[in-house]
Image (spheres, rainbow, N blue to C red):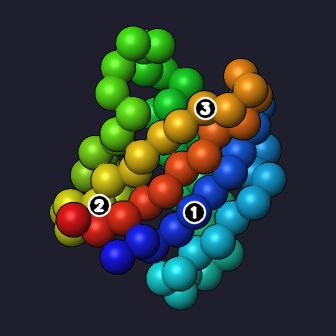
Amino acid sequence: MIRAVIVINTQGKPRITKFYDPQPVEKQQELIRDIFGVLCSRAENVSNFIQADAIFGPVGDKAGVQAFCNSILRICIRQL
């Protein structure tokens, strides 16, 4: 099940966010900040999937990351 679709630019500003799992706005903003922090700190040649239990919790969620035009990142969070 897809839990969220997030499009952010490389400066960390969210362009499109759609959360299919109801969450308060503060939690959504915290999730976006945490994901962007993980993306900025990883190498260029790693996988397009992020599995960070500190961000998503122990439920086994993964984020698929794809870059477009060197300026936009699309993130889809889904439960395994």
Q: Residue at x 72, y 36 (%)?
A: 72
**30 or 12, nearer to the observer:** 12
Q: Are marks 1 and 2 in contact (CB under 8 Å)?
A: no
Q: Is residue 64 left or right of residue 75?
A: left
Residue at label 1? 5
Residue at label 3? 67
Q: Is residue 22 left or right of residue 78?
A: right
Q: Classify 41 as above or below 48.
A: above
Total marks in image: 3
Residue at label 2? 61
Quadrant of image for the N terminus:
bottom left
Question: Which amino acid is tagged 3?
Answer: Ala
Quadrant of image for the C terminus:
bottom left
Residues packed near mark 1 inside 10 Å, few (<14), some (14 to 19) or many (20 plus): some
Where does residue 33 sit, x and y in percent of width and height? Answer: 60, 47
Q: Can residue 30 be seen? A: no
Q: Gap in Å between the C-alphas at discs 1 and 3?
A: 14 Å
Where does residue 54 sit, x and y in percent of width and height? Answer: 31, 50
Q: Residue at x 29, y 68 (%)?
A: 79
For marks 1 and 2, the one nearer the N-term is 1
For marks 2 and 3, the one nearer the N-term is 2
